[in-house]
Amino acid sequence: METGQKAAIGRPRGFDTEEALERAMRVFWEQGYEGASLTDLTRAMGINRTSMYAAFGNKEDLFRKSLERYTEGPASYGARALREPTARQVATALLNGAVRATTGIGSPAGCLGVQGSLAAGEPGSNARDVLTTWREEFVSLLGDRFQQAVDEGDLPADADAGLLARHLMTVANGIAVQAAGGITRDVLQQVADMTLRSWPPATGPAQPDA
Amino acid sequence: METGQKAAIGRPRGFDTEEALERAMRVFWEQGYEGASLTDLTRAMGINRTSMYAAFGNKEDLFRKSLERYTEGPASYGARALREPTARQVATALLNGAVRATTGIGSPAGCLGVQGSLAAGEPGSNARDVLTTWREEFVSLLGDRFQQAVDEGDLPADADAGLLARHLMTVANGIAVQAAGGITRDVLQQVADMTLRSWPPATGPAQPDA
DNA sequence: CAGATTCGGTACCGATCGGTACTGAAAGAG
DNA sequence: CTCTTTCAGTACCGATCGGTACCGAATCTG
């Protein structure tokens, strides 16, 4: 109904839904779910409240759709990374992509999937849970990809695919936090390079102290 | 005035300031600055609004004081880590401390210094900046500590102390994000161990692909 | 054209936001 | 005791929150 076949009858919509969603996404990205008011959102979208509710449902729906757009836009490096031919290339593409996406010159600093809502009061708890699920789904896919690499002999047979995925996600999310704090792209790229230089890290028992 | 010499005249305060601050800290920790309403805070503190304003100033002051208490309480592992005798022990204490603090059984999941406010609207921008400064101050201290290790020969002469500090902070903050998403202590400890197993990572040119 | 449908805009809903004036009681000094 | 100070509580402030009823205008079908 909202985005199905375009209704043949009635006055057509006077604004570009995709353009409006793009602008809403950026507000959520910059200010988080709770920090983005309807006034902030509709002002950035260039439409009024009524049109927003008619086109997107409510604030929570708008947030979900913004996250979808974010996934297919600024965060599409994640899906691309999963399709890289080797585990090392997957890791490299993921961290490089995270650095680029969280420090884009024309985009808000940080990652919508992290700073959109980490902790929230009751009215924002749904948005927080949506983001948690969003992150965990990616970790799961990443773990599957690394397990495939183990099965193919691309990673050592005793490698813990899930742990490698969790480790990489931890660094990627850490990069997002640094970026939100204003750390520059070149510094974060050095952090990513440093992580990748010792990747895959050993999964076995701890190495003795140097 | 607020916490100086106890005024000899007038009715004495009917609640424990430290206890009330501890409870406020936990609310900010769980719900973030914007997600914690005055009603949430005062209800948890067991006092009414008037008493809170008289004792702590306003919501922003209460947040700052909660962060101070957090620094000296749940986050005191940071200062302790800086006093470890070797750079490796500093890194180990920091990551192990982060894992423990963000997954404490009786405490909210995650780190107040991260999820307290990463992105915010205008009314919460001060709190966000306070936390950014808080994190950056620690990175600075950590960098100083590693530079000292370089000077002492505890780290290689060509090691980039600032970058090592940034890298470690990135992992620590990433751990906090995972913890906020409900990831368990043992998994995060494995992530920390994995990071420490290849620490200090090489600072030089990238190693060739395996 | 007539009729149906949706547009964008205003004005408003009850609830909650952070913050404060006011009040009567409690506890100090003298 | 009186006087002063601060307590804790209620009730309220204007502003803003997310969300909606209503409107005239615009644009479709037939």
Image (cartoon, coloured by chain):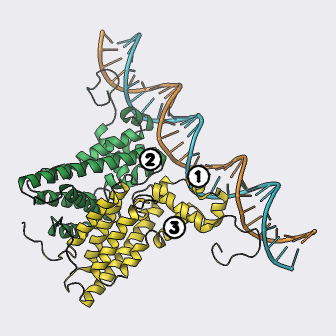
Chain colours: A yellow, B green, C orange, D cyan
| x then y, percent, for residue A59 | 56, 60
Toward the viewer: C29 or A129? A129
Residue A74, percent from left and from top: 45, 68
Q: Is residue B14 above or below residue B46?
A: above
Chain letter for mark 1, please. Answer: A
Q: Dot 2 lies on which element?
A: helix
Mark 3 belongs to chain? A
Q: Picture coordinates of residue A16 (x, y %)?
A: 63, 66
Quadrant where the image shows the N terminus of chain B: top left
Residue receiving disc 1:
A39
As shown in the figure, which amino acid type bears the numbered disc 3?
Arg
The reply to whether dot 3 and dot 1 touch (C-beta < 8 Å) is: no
CA separation in Å, label 1 and label 2: 16 Å
Q: CA distance from mark 3 to mark 1?
A: 18 Å
Q: Which mark is residue B61?
A: none
Q: Nearer the viewer, residue A126 or B6?
A: A126
- Badge 1: how crowded within 10 Å, few (<14), some, or many (20+)? few
Q: Which residue is mark 3?
A: A64
Residue A197 visible in rendering: yes
On the same chain, marks 1 and 2? The answer is: no
Residue B4 found in image quarter:
top left
The residue that mark 2 highlights is: B124
Q: Are marks 1 and 2 in contact (CB under 8 Å)?
A: no
